[in-house]
Amino acid sequence: MKEQWKNKEISGIACRHYMETDSTNAVIKRLIREDEAPLPLPFCVYADQQTAGRGRMDRTFVSPGGGLYMSVLLPAQDAEKAYQLTPLAAVAVLRALKELHVADVKIKWVNDLYLRDRKICGILCEGVQFNDGKSGVIVGIGVNLKTPEGGFPSEAGAAGALDREDITRNQLLKKILSHLQKAVPGGPCEWSDYESNSLLNFRHVVCRLGNRELSGFVKGIGKQYELLLETEDGETHAVNCGEVTKVRPMARAAFFDFDGTMRPGDSIVPYVAFVRKKKKMPRWQYVLVLLSTAGYLLRILPSTVPKTAALRFRKRLTEEENRALDMEFARFLIDSAYPVALKQWSNYQKAGHQMVVLSASTENYMRFVAELLEADALLCTPIDGDGKVRHNCHGKDKVVRAEEYAAKENISLEESCAFGDSGSDIYILTRVGDGFAVNAKQKLLKKIRGKDISSVSWR
């Protein structure tokens, strides 16, 4: 039975629509071979269903009814370099989906798009030669719009679909064609969108290169769309071709601020009182702490100065004395924590989250707080070897520290949560998937208005 088709023009491109065909890439190849008439460039063939869809390495691309399966013929200087258009096509589909308000779409190097860890789109670029000796490239794109009744067959692997009733095939087709025409080979905007939406960034993967495998940590995407893979020996490899066969599942973390969130007020104030009660801080050092604190409150001095002053007494004590003092104070802090806070900590711990104390308080006593909480990690204000506090783990620095930890431990910040009480915590609360303003101060309450951040009280 002869295939039925209709000619159309969409976004200024000549198109041919099939209800069903074997493969849209194959259709274009036949048209070139038959040479009924020179095809206009660009030229698009699209179908509602394919019976012999193909992916990379000649694999079957499952193409059930209700999808968008399209191929666009473009001119090319060199048919052998057709694969270079693959990342540009991925960016075109990404932009089209985002314009249709499909969030959380990611590009899996090099040619697939994923939505919530399910593959919704595959891309196959093939070089062709015209009868006049010139070169072209076929950009094949398949998007699953609906999950078939009974689900995808097992050979489709981790296939998924948009499953959005408000998005039609023609809407998506029109937008993809529009963005595909705007894609610029080597353009900085295309690379930026590709790199920032990479599914594999900061993940541990196994990459097959011919007959060998390379495993490591993905540091990012290079300017030539190569995968930057750091192996266990610390060497970074720029992988230009290959296939990622395994991706380690990402973990979740719960980032808890401590002062004001898990317990009332700043811990540095009771710390000074605790040290004074133990008669470890001379009167003159106490006066220095008061003066430097006043300077901080008047915005004359940075917050690191009063913290350094509060720790200055430690130089007079032995390492064992300091350790005993910090351990005792850490127990006091845990005892004064909100019961609800400790209960929530325990709940997330039992749920399998990586538990992280993320605090502006200093590491000398916070390390023992983290031990008592059985935390997986502590990210806090460090103290130099000379006892000085040079920078706080505060505001945007919390995000930097959290991102570094997430990259190292293969944690998805989008699947993680964070708890904080002050205005400066807005950065970490908006960086994770679920942010909670706990016992929120007025400044933070103003900043979370209109944002998807929950406000709770643990007092």
Image: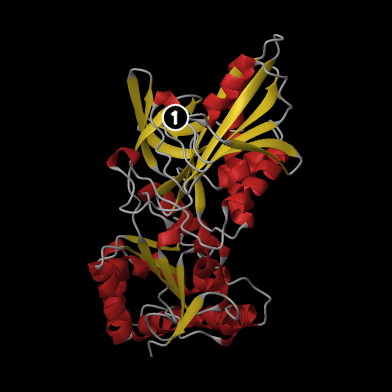
Whether 453 is drawn above or below 93: the answer is: below
Residue sitting at the far bottom: 459
Residue 200 at x, y percent in the picture: 45, 42
Q: From this viewpoint, is residue 224 visible?
A: no
Residue 133 at x, y percent in the picture: 69, 9
Front one among 397 and 292: 397
Front one among 440 and 79: 79
Residue sitting at the far front: 1
Amino acid type for the residue under numbered disc 1: Arg
Front one among 421 and 327: 421
Tell me the SS state at disc 1: loop
Residue 219 at x, y percent in the picture: 48, 39
Residue sitting at the far right: 12
Total number of numbered discs in the rendering: 1
Residue sitting at x 68%, y 31%: 43
The residue at which mark 1 appears reads as 54
Residue sitting at x 52%, y 74%: 452
User: How crowded is the residue under tag 1: few (<14 C-alpha within 10 Å), some, or many (20+)?
Assistant: many
Q: From this viewpoint, is residue 380 visible?
A: yes
Whether 389 is drawn above or below 330: the answer is: above
Residue sitting at x 63%, y 23%: 137
Residue sitting at x 39%, y 84%: 276
Q: Quadrant of the C terminus?
A: bottom left
